[in-house]
Image (cartoon, rainbow, N blue to C red):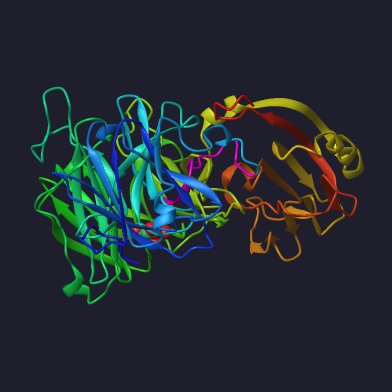
Amino acid sequence: MLSVCAAVASAADLKLKITKKYINFPVSHKVDRRAMTLSVRGQEPCRFVIRLADGEPDYWVFRDVSNLKGKTVTLSYEGSEAALAKVYQDDRIAGEDEIYNEKYRPQYHFTTRRGWINDPNGMVFYKGKYHLFYQHNPAEREWENMHWGHAVSTDLLHWEELPVALHPDTIGTIFSGSAVIDYGNTAGYNAKDEPAMVAFYTADHPKSQRQCMAYSLDEGLTFTKYEGNPIIDSYDKWQSHDTRDPKVFWYAPGGHWVLVLNERNGHSIYNSKNLKDWTFQSHITGFWECPELFEISVDGNANNKKWVMWGASGTYMVGTFDGKKFTPETTKLCNLNGSAYAAQVFNNISPEDGRVIKMAWGRISFDDMPFNGCMLLPQEQILKTVNGGLRLVSRPVKEVGQLFTEAYSGTDLTASQANEIMKRFGGNDVLRIRATFRLTYSTDAGISYRGQRLVNYDMNGNRLNGEFYATEAPGSMELDADIYVDRGMVEVYIDGGLYSYSMKRDVKSTNPEGYVFWGNQLELKNLAVYTVKSIWDNGK
Ligand code: FRU
């Protein structure tokens, strides 16, 4: 499992004097993982595991080596020499023309070009760009070798993937964490006109998980790891391997930094003045992995704010926070289901914008693809009073609207009228459908695509795709579903974002049916269908 840098005896070596942009590696899942060490004189060697194909590769992965031009890279591989001999450098990624055009590749959700992704990390807005780092295995489509991948966007829709930002080292592989812009130069790294982007991550090692820091003066392209790492080592205190995923933000009222860390059975709060020295303050039980804590207006009123804390599953509590301790005022609440995991909100959103914007990992596997996992649509968070209680509403950010062109819109349709219209779109697996279901006679109703139930509302059991959901208005016979179909995946937002879920699309279904509404005498109060423009520059 461990893939930290270390010297190892190798079966074969390949030396490459770097003249091109990428090194291309052939991958076969029929082959076991073997250790590869990449060494460059004067730099710490990097070790990872990879399944180099000695026969026909399933696909190719790559490493951007443009910053190593003129240097000699030695690749030492503990597996097949014949496979290592197929590794080559080029200015193009092997199979580059297919990227973003693959059969199940989502067309308006972020996915990586090659390899595996999970949690969003280091989400921060800086100089007009949203930075999205993420858990990434650049060496294959399954989880392993954790690095931080990096992508940027100016509009939360179109992403440009940049070289991997953080590589494993002797302290560990690079697990989840966050990033801030140190405008006050509290850590002392700032250059003239360039405040440091400071990243916090967990170094995962078989012995323990420890918190580390790295800073960048070039907008996250390259990071320098802090020589005093780790900054937090709490294994002894918790007697647990599970101490990870630091989320850091500036707490203006106290003039200090806050770090929220998942430790064993919940989230701990640490404080610091300089981003390097951290003091434990408090702990709240009941959360697991990937902590988040942020302030948000109640019903849009900037004079009435609360704090929201969540864990990786998305269950959350609303409460107060004094910089040292989060005090819940609600029990755990939940507004989502399905594939969403490990969500984070952007740090350093400009005050003129002021939105709380979340992104979550979609735990969706894209069969037979050279990439895996995706990010769900960026979502604005709104804290709303619903029937006297506070609820977090989550809905795609307004920018997403630019992608859609209305292809049909109507009101008051019977299900059979709606089905007639939907026949036009049956072959379209990149689509948005917004439907308000009116269950006049039926106790259950929904819509399917190729036989898969995208919406399956059982009003009798108050179950939506198997999970409890109650409408805001007691006794309501209506349900609004905003359905985003994107090749290998589907996201559904219910009743304006009061609830949402996401899932893998059944791409292998042999059911010939397109989009079909069902339900006894079901009516569609509203129906709108939109075609979608790809976010990728792939001619579609
Ligand atoms: C959540 C998680 C994190 C960890 C990361 C490792 O999905 O388990 O707790 O840092 O993934 O990839």
Place of residue 163 in the rendered image (x, y in percent of width and height, measured from the top left): 35, 37
Residue nearest the observer in this picture, 329 or 483:
483
Relative to residue 471, is residue 189 drawn left or right?
left
Measuring 25% from the left and 35% from the top, which residue is drawn there? 68
Relative to residue 322, is residue 510 drawn left or right?
right
Quadrant of the snapshot with the C terminus: top right
Quadrant of the snapshot with the N terminus: bottom left
Work out which residue is located at the far bottom of the displayed protein and give it. Answer: 239
The stretch in magenta equals 104-120
Place of residue 460 in the rendered image (x, y in percent of width and height, measured from the top left): 76, 64
Relative to residue 416, is residue 289 drawn left or right?
left
Measuring 74% from the left and 33% from the top, which residue is drawn there? 529
Q: Report which quarter residue 425 is drawn in.
A: top right
Residue nearest the observer in this picture, 410 or 113:
113
Q: Report which quarter residue 253 is drawn in.
A: top left
Q: Is residue 117 magenta?
A: yes
Q: Report which quarter residue 503 is drawn in.
A: bottom right
Judge whether residue 317 can be spotted in this image.
no
Relative to residue 33, is residue 184 drawn left or right?
left
Q: Quadrant of ligand 1?
A: bottom left
Measuring 38% from the left and 65% from the top, which residue is drawn there? 288
Q: Main secondary structure of the magenta part?
A: loop
Place of residue 470 in the rendered image (x, y in percent of width and height, measured from the top left): 64, 57
Place of residue 15 in the rendered image (x, y in percent of width and height, measured from the top left): 28, 45
* Number of marks drawn: 0
Q: Is residue 188 above or below residue 245?
A: above
Judge whether residue 366 can be spotted in this image.
yes
Residue nearest the observer in this picture, 245 or 60:
60
Residue nearest the observer in this picture, 46 or 254:
46
Q: Is residue 130 above or below residue 395?
A: above
